[in-house]
Image: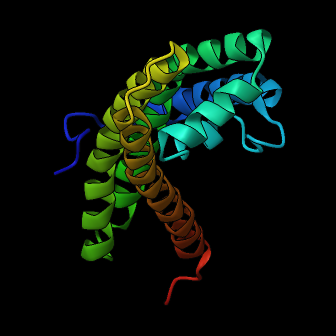
Amino acid sequence: MDPFYQWSSRPLHKSLCVSFIATLGCFLAIEATNRPLENDIAPLGILSLQFAGELSSALLILDSWGETARLHAAFNLGFDYLFLVVYALFLSAACSWLARARQPTSQGFATAGFILAWAVFAAAALDMIENVALWQLLLGSMNAHWPILATACATVKFAIILTGIGYIVIGAWAVLIHRHRPTDS
């Protein structure tokens, strides 16, 4: 069930560390290119477009961005393809690593971690579909299905990602407590 079942702990840990650094770097780049997109109509920048949900709202957001902001949006969407690879690898590796660590004492928690490790890859696929929909809007498509598709994909994607992050926080806390618990003699 573990997506990294062929990897021993050392390569998984190394992958976890490298993907964390890459995820953090990509996140900072995405955040920097998102700032010019934030305004009264799109207070969350590209996230506002992701969750517009209908064509009229998406068009208002796009109209609120000037030419420079639209270039930032285009870069943001293009760079997101790298970001989705590294965040998926990081979150999946972290869920698998924690599931392995908790497997001897909590089989249910471990099973949830392995399921989330796979689900994160589905979130990345949804992110790709969402990006295609957003590209179509950025390129001027008037198809009302694009904002609906983007919002649906973003909603499920973020639900999976936030669940994975929650699992990582709870799992890391459990591992730390377990390691620092005095052993019974």
Q: Foreground residue, 114 or 144?
A: 144
Q: Foreground residue, 67 or 93?
A: 67
Q: Foreground residue, 152 or 105?
A: 152
Please give left or right for residue 172 compared with residue 97 in the image.
right
Please give left or right for residue 31 compared with residue 80 in the image.
right
**Percent from the top left, x then y, of residue 101?**
39, 60
Q: Is residue 33 visible?
A: yes
Say if 65 sits above or below 55 in the image. above
Outermost residue toward the left?
Answer: 1
Number of marks drawn:
0
**Percent from the top left, x then y, of residue 110?**
30, 65
Q: How is the model colour-coded?
A: rainbow
**Percent from the top left, x then y, of residue 33?**
74, 21
Say if 10 sits above or below 103 in the image. above
**Percent from the top left, x then y, of residue 78?**
53, 14
Please give left or right for residue 98 compared with residue 23 in the image.
left
Q: Foreground residue, 157 or 73?
A: 73
Q: Residue at x 50, y 34 (%)?
A: 87
Q: Quadrant of residue 44?
A: top right
Q: Quadrant of residue 143?
A: top left
Q: Residue at x 71, y 36 (%)?
A: 45
Q: Is residue 97 visible?
A: no
Q: Residue at x 36, y 40 (%)?
A: 149
